[in-house]
Amino acid sequence: MNVAGTITVDIRDTIALDQNVFDCTGTKLGTVVNIEYATGWLTVQANPLSDQAQYVPFRLITHIDPNELFLGATKDDLRRDYSAPPPRTTSVQGEGDDQAATTIQPSGYDGAPLVVHQAKLSDLRDGIDTDFKVCTSDMVDLGRIREYDPATGLMVLSKGTFSKHDVVVPITLVDKVDTYMLQVVLIASEADVKRMTPVNLVRIGAQLAQQD
């Protein structure tokens, strides 16, 4: 469609893996290594094996052609504001066996809250056990479960490379449980887990322990 001399296109049809990405000054940032059309975010890296990634919302895109993509922000802006996956928060609804966790994050299209995950907690509780490995959504190994309380849904992880202290993770952050690989994968990123505070954990544990 042409409006006032401007051609508009659906950017979902023009973003592609391996496109070169530039900031608003023309500085090359790297290439597109991942695209999430449903949530409106893309991942940019200069060297996927060593460099830190930037997690860029589609709304920062100013121009695209088949080989290049330009953003309306500087390299420093992106490093400051977009060096972690979009923040996710999880809330619990219902009681007893009907408890469910809903996770939201900002949409990359307009910044509005977007539901990215819903899980019935009763489907997850029985699959988790001690000694399972726990990984974040960006596949950071948090450690193994040393203690697990199905009533509160809190998992205590042994000290590991992620932290010098025990890490407590609520079941509300669980995306999937692999009983064959003895692994729990979270819907939350490493940055989301680091934002969790003891007050958050106590409140979530109390909600999960409520039984009528």
Image (tube, rainbow, N blue to C red):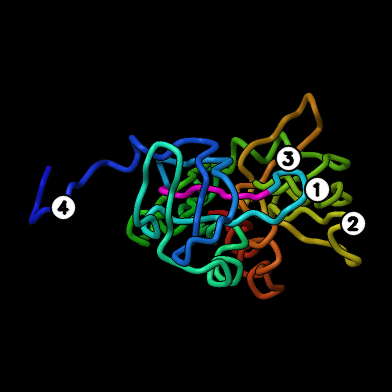
| Residue at position x 48%, y 51% in the image | 102
Q: Earlier in the sequence, mark 2 or mark 3?
A: 2
Q: State yes or no: discs 1 and 2 in contact (Cβ < 8 Å).
A: yes
Question: In this rendering, which labeled residue sits more in front, label 4 or label 3?
Answer: 4
Instruction: Give the answer, above or below, for where 126 lies relative to 210.
Output: above
Magenta-highlighted stretch: main secondary structure? strand
> Secondary structure beneath disc 1?
strand
Q: Which mark is residue 6?
A: 4
> Secondary structure beneath disc 4?
strand
Looking at the picture, tell me which residue is in the foreground, 154 or 114.
114
Q: Earlier in the sequence, mark 1 or mark 4?
A: 4
Q: Which residue is mark 3?
A: 184
Q: Which residue is mark 1?
A: 141
Instruction: Judge left or right: residue 142 versus residue 38.
Output: right
Structural distance between the alpha carbons of marks 1 and 4: 47 Å
Q: Residue furthest left?
A: 4
Quadrant where the N terminus lies?
A: top left
Kind of residue at badge 3: Val
Q: Residue furthest bottom?
A: 199
Structural distance between the alpha carbons of marks 4 and 3: 48 Å
Structural distance between the alpha carbons of marks 1 and 2: 8 Å
Question: In this rendering, which labeled residue sits more in front, label 1 or label 4?
Answer: 4
Q: Which mark is residue 161?
A: 2
Instruction: Give the answer, above or below, for where 120 lies relative to 140.
Output: above
Looking at the picture, tell me which residue is in the foreground, 149 or 11.
11
Write the start and end of the magenta stretch as one range: 40-46
